[in-house]
Image (spheres, rainbow, N blue to C red):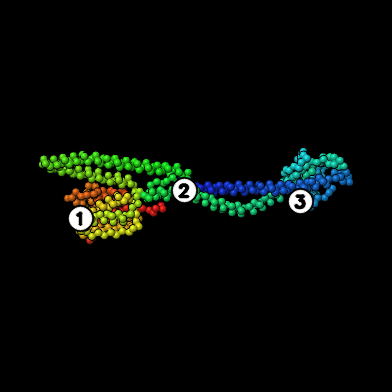
Amino acid sequence: MLNRLSLRLRLVFAGLASVGLALVAAFIGLSLLFERHVERRVAEEITLHLNQVIAGLGKDGSGTLDVLRALVDPRFERPLSGLYWQVASDGGVRRSRSLWDATLALPASPGPAPRQTTIIGPGGAPLLLVLREVVTERRLGAQKVVAAVAIDRSDITRATADFRRDLLPYLALLALLLLAASAAQIAIGLRPLTDLRLRIARIRNGASHRLGSDFPKEVQPLTSEVDALLQSREEQLRKARERAADLAHRLKTPLQALAGDVLRLRQAGQDQAADDIEGLIATMRRLVDHEMARARIADRDRRARTDPTRVMRDVVSVLRRTPRGETLDWTIEAPNDLRVDMDADDLAELIGVLTENAARYARLSVRLALRRADGEAAIDIEDDGPGVPADKLANVLKRGERLDTSSDGAGLGLSIASSLAEAAGGALSLQNRLSGGLRVSLRLPLSPPLDG
């Protein structure tokens, strides 16, 4: 199922996944970065409070170490406000009014440098704590004191949540920009494949024979292999046609020898045997001509783009100069905008056979008409001759059947013409006209536009 999915859809899904993952990572990363930034700023703020607490250390009237200088922030005086200080010494623990009757659980051995950590405070609220161990002045007894200031982390959490809400619209806009950029990237990246499709269509239409080498290096190996395949196929077809031609040439000598035997049989008075052999010779010649014509059509493989109007005019121009053609009235009705998938020489031979046949049986006129019919090119060749007996009309196009058995005829014959039309993807049909004469209708596939 995945292998049948188009490249464009694959790239779209990959783009959506990558953009989604990138935006999720950006959301998480920016949120953590903002949280750390806010935490750092808050830590700097409470470090200032910690320095004020240490600077305000002194002894009260009873000689107990305490913070004698009042801190500026009023939250230290409001119970459970979320901002607290605490000083622990050998003489006991002093704390801000905001702690009420609670005590902060300070880590042991904080060290002389400010240390930042998280603890659980009153009511189970997480607190950001900055503490430091200092030695008081001699006038204060040169004793070790652990001073700490803590703030409720809910403010940091709330600021981070606000930042995330503000970030979402910008991430949505960024997602749209990234998707638009991804769509443009897909369109640009797949453009060589579109060009490849158009060039293959040109090869199929006969406008070109190779894909060429001006492709990106990722596509170039594919186009090189296709061109090599086309060349190999042409070579194989050429050799096959040559073998067919050699076979036909080799058959001529035995057929000529048989023709000589026919003559000797007639001279010997054995006319029946001569007629039988002569019939076999004619059949073999028709079969050879038939297969040679099909091989020639197969070799070209509908890779041509031919103007049937020009071919019809060329054929009629030649036939008008024949003794029979000079006596006939020729009519051509054809537009100039139709192209068919057939080699020009093959089409000329096919139309020539049908037109010669019409001229042979016509009394006064022959008409050729080209039209578009059901997505195909229809070529009608009409004469005003006697037509074909109704009981023979269905068998005329069968192999070995001929309209006029009294004449040797020339060209391919109607049965071979029908095979050639089928090999080119078309069809041949016969119909007697109501006004007299025969209409031969040749249907051929139209060539699509050169742009594919």
Where in the figure is residue 89, as x and y percent of width and height?
82, 41
Where in the figure is residue 224, as x and y percent of width and height?
42, 42
Question: 284 or 334, which lies in front?
Answer: 334
Viewer can see residue 430: no
> Which of the 4 image quarters holds residue 288?
top left
Q: Which residue is mark 2?
A: 192
Q: Earlier in the sequence, mark 3 or mark 1?
A: 3
**Residue type (three-letter) at the residue carrying disc 3:** Ser
**Residue type (three-letter) at the residue carrying disc 1:** Pro
Where in the figure is residue 386, as x and y percent of width and height?
20, 57
Q: Disc number at residue 204?
A: none
Question: 361 or 389, which lies in front?
Answer: 361
- SS at circle 2: helix
Q: Earlier in the sequence, mark 2 or mark 3?
A: 3
Q: Residues within 10 Å of mark 2 (few under 14, many from 20)?
A: some
Q: Disc number at residue 81?
A: 3
**Residue type (three-letter) at the residue carrying disc 2:** Pro
Separation of marks 2 and 3 at Cα, in angstroms: 67 Å
Say which residue appears at 50% left-offset and 50% top-offset.
Answer: 188
Q: Which residue is mark 1?
A: 323
Image vertical order of residue 245 relative to residue 188, above or below:
above
Q: Earlier in the sequence, mark 1 or mark 2?
A: 2
Say which residue appears at 20% left-offset and 44% top-offset.
Answer: 282
Question: 166 or 91, which lies in front?
Answer: 166
Separation of marks 3 and 1 at Cα, in angstroms: 122 Å
Say which residue appears at 83% left-offset and 49% top-offset.
Answer: 69
